[in-house]
Image (cartoon, coloured by chain):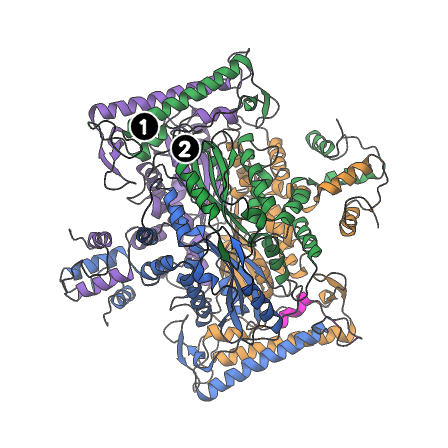
Chain colours: A blue, B green, C purple, D orange
């Protein structure tokens, strides 16, 4: 993978080979993918670098509340599903995971809005950022949606698409080259031109564009991770952050398969009905033909409800 | 240890014997004490049930900021000390630990003020609390301090001490017996008196005294744990919560020895001088005899400063 | 109201009379009830002591995202409903409220689990708690539910109810009297018996029962307050904390009427359907008679769904 | 001020003129500057748009712990200073403030690391960013420090400075023009070229440089605000974020003058001595000439200590 240096790739191989003994709970599915970089976008990746707990840890925490008694294995699944369905969130907080992520700055800006996580980001005050930018694949060059200000419309084609790619590539390359010129140092810190001092790194970085890649360690508990994924693996999320969320969903499936299944059923695939929507559904289930007018729902809510029920309007 | 049932003790033994293989970082010192209950107070305990990360994880997170370059092992210690001294807190957030704690309710009420942790507590809505209360050792039966409203004075003696212990023991026993009577069920949920219904658990619990023991799982990152310990292992903390904090300090020392050493030097043993205090110290170091009057410090601050400098006033 | 001293009542009157001028947004409905204690349970209360923001502040924050353009007043309501329906939570965080609450300790223990709030509680390390305990009204003396370990069953009657009240009253009075005896001081701090020292307050408090009243200032943003109320004004919440939540709902209605209405429709009265439940509903709306068997729902989930749809099973 | 549109300026004037009546605490010093934009950098500003509480609210919260008793006004100051000195943080959490800030994106990225605040940022997914970039004043065009990787060295001069400004200005202008071209719409949303669709806003924004201005509402409690200011008004903070912190310090002084004074004395002007440093100071105060060698301090720590004591090394 182009986004990892040979040195990094070597470190990952070494870490994957070394094995120790532990008395802690082990999640075999996640051990198998530990440290390995899952490619995302053109130069990014997500990789799990540590974790704590498993499905059994969720059950154990929930059972502190229940006290004595042992239960058969299939009851673990039922309890986890019950907790997820009724939004009993604290047992899921007992599992923790840490990722190493490489991502464009504009994606990092969306991501960081989720405050309940621990973050250590590569600092462009101290260090020089690599010459890597996100350039969308042609099939993701979407036009602005005319109906929805947040969404994307059709894919740009022909000359317009070519021009966009040319501008993105050209500006990223040029601003990076000027960044390097202002810094006046190569990768080892040697001045390029001994007659110049070089601008402070903390200032020079302001010339970079928002598709420049950065990286960070990001650590969260399972409850907050699932909340993040519910929002960011959703169809309304921007394609670029959703690509990361989908890669992370695979790590959750490998780590806590029961919690993952419950999350799929009760969160990702779930819908919420307002009091008024529920009233309409009750009437429809009773065989009544309910018109939008007089239903208590606005046209927008009506469309949303019919969408949930799989009906065209 | 009296505070664990035979069943619990058996589970702990089983967990301590089972060992798995992992690619994750392993902290050998903490593995050795994993699951084992450290006795605290008369019936309480603290035990580590899981952890994530080690000293190297702190260093790794800090070095994301610095980029390339390898460093010798002794520099890890220097970097951790630098981070602690300058309160760079995010790298310490990359380590996480989970405890199982048994503690009196009034201690739990102090402890829960620390909000940045994950907690699952034994629920007296669902379950019946055990018949266990904290009764202080005679040497901890302190009188109210006359000079400091928060602190303890001398130890009570003779008849007064005996009377206090008699009251604490008698009231805890009586209120618990009435709790059981109101519940009208034994440990298996069988009614004691078939002619009665039994009060709801969520109500009956209100008759228990604040020295009744409860238990919880408590999970925090190292940064927040150290903040908790700086406050609760301090000489101004109430003896009972301090006993827990001191047991936890031993687990931190076993887990992240470099971070522990830095914490001892730069947080536990450190003092903060105000702008005015620093001014006085500068003059004293220059050989000047500075009187309190005109020093810019109140009498209280002056006493605090002289205390720091090891001078009697 | 018995739970406020004459002195406190006087301070409240003074605060209610004093009026100042401000350029900040003012919520007239809440101004009218500011400082006034709403009685809860037998000796408790909730009162609003400060607030920040109103419905317009929610709209203003949401529109930072939208940029230019003015909108008619009725669109404010539509926007707030849209935000609530789609769980866009950050605009609701722009409003803040501070309560002064008097509540039994066992209720405080449930309440404090909500970590995203600021709390200053009356400290029994420094001060002496008042001689006030919560004793339930006879109609709230519920038996333990036999079907649901968390819930309440029928109301206790006759001799059993009388015995419960006698035990609760007797034990609270006795443990408080012994608390006072151990402290050996009256309300002004004068020793009751000059031959004794008096036990430290931080220790004596452990003899109190969990129905003793405490008090605190509790401050939260509207988003977190609504989350608290969604859980605690719910029919599954324990009656005693629900009584506080319902009093607080009235303050929210007076403060941010549009947000309150949206909260009622989209959160309090809403239901969530899992992917499988939604599949069943789609089939039922299409006129199909769906049996539980083979529906993909467990019996428990089926009962929950039929309950939502208003059908008996 | 160039950074506010005429329309915004009109709204601010209107808000400043309108006055309502309130029973809430009023902070007269802050009322006087409410809504007014304090200019920061070349196009940015900070303005207070709402607040809650004052010095008296801090005292009130602290005194919940102390119970009965009235105190004279000068004791309020003493109590606030005591709380600040001993890091009793919860009373300061009882005050809340909301700012509207316009700032370059690279500053926003530093700022957002402070997680304990509420934020609503202008969204470039929905809206089009203005054509405004931060270009440093010549006296802030610092070279990279050779001794300290995070810091700035001397100011660039002559041809090098001119070249840096030319690059920053040119690249910001060009990338913005290409952003506008890709969007293919003017400020009203009308297509510039009817034959093109225009790239989705959420994608086009990635072409902007990190010195582009964004804006947000940022709300925090006083405790967290002071923590932010202690870090960001510090001499080690990057000049650009420090400019915002200094403007905010003026609003804190106007709002809670007693807390501000205590913050200046006990936080901004304070120093922390490690256990080893304290040992050295004790010996120096006793008249001993202590050499670095054998002092228990590293050379770096020794320099730090001598710096605190005002001694050259």
Mark 1 element type:
helix
Judged from the image, the secondary structure of the residue bearing numbered disc 2 is helix
Q: Position of residue C265 (x, y in %)?
A: 29, 54
Q: Is residue B118 visible?
A: no
Residues D11 and C199: in front is C199
Q: Residue furthest front?
A: B17
- Relative image position of residue A58 (x, y in whole percent): 40, 51
- For the point 42% across and 49% down, the residue is C224
Residue tagged by mark 2?
C105
Kindly indicate whether the residue at mark 1 contacts the one at mark 2 (C-beta within 8 angstroms).
Answer: no
Above or below: residue D85 compared with residue C301: above
Q: Position of residue A55 (x, y in %)?
A: 40, 54
Q: Which region of the structure is painted magenta?
A: A190-212
Residue lying at 71% horizontally and 44% vertically, measured from the top left: D271
Q: From the image, which quarter does the C terminus of chain B lie in?
A: top right
Location of residue B65 (image quadrant): bottom right
Q: Residues within 10 Å of mark 2 (few under 14, many from 20)?
A: many
Could you give the CA–CA distance between mark 2 and mark 1, rounded to whole angstroms?
20 Å
What secondary structure characterizes most of the magenta part? Answer: loop
Q: Is residue A234 visible?
A: yes
- In front here: D30 or D178? D178
Specify whether disc 2 shares its chain with disc 1.
Answer: no
In the rendering, at what x and y percent does residue C106 appear? 39, 34
Circle 1 chain: B
**Residue position marked by numbered label 1 in the rendering:** B180
Does A113 sit left or right of C308 as displayed?
right
Is residue C290 toward the left or the right of residue B302 in the image? left
């Amino acid at each position: 993978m182009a986004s990892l240096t040979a040195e990094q790739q070597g470190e990952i191989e070494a870490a994957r080979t070394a094995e120790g003994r532990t008395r802690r709970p082990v999640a075999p599915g996640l051990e198998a993918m530990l440290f390995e970089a899952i490619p995302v976008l053109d130069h990014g990746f997500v990789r799990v670098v540590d974790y704590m707990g498993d499905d059994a840890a969720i059950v154990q925490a929930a059972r502190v509340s229940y006290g004595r008694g042992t239960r058969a294995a299939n009851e673990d699944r039922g309890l986890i599903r019950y907790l997820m369905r009724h939004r009993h969130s604290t047992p899921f907080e007992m599992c923790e995971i840490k990722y190493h992520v490489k991502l464009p700055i504009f994606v990092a800006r969306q991501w960081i809005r989720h405050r309940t996580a621990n973050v250590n980001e590569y600092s462009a005050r101290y260090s020089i950022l690599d010459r890597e930018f996100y350039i969308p694949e042609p099939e993701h060059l979407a036009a602005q949606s005319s109906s929805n200000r947040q969404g994307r419309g059709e894919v740009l084609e022909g000359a317009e698409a070519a021009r966009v790619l040319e501008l993105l590539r050209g500006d990223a390359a040029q601003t990076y080259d000027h960044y390097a010129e202002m810094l006046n140092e190569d990768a080892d810190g040697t001045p390029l031109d001994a007659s110049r001092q070089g601008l402070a790194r903390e200032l020079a970085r302001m010339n970079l564009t928002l598709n420049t890649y950065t990286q960070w360690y990001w650590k969260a508990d399972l409850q907050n991770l699932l909340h993040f994924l519910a929002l960011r693996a959703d169809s309304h999320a921007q394609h670029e952050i959703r690509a990361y969320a989908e890669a992370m969903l695979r790590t959750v499936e490998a780590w806590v398969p029961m919690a993952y299944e419950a999350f799929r059923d009760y969160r990702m695939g779930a819908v919420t009905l307002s009091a008024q929507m529920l009233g309409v559904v009750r009437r429809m289930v009773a065989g009544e033909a309910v018109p939008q007018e007089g239903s208590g729902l606005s046209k927008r809510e009506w469309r949303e409800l019919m969408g949930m029920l799989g009906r065209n309007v």
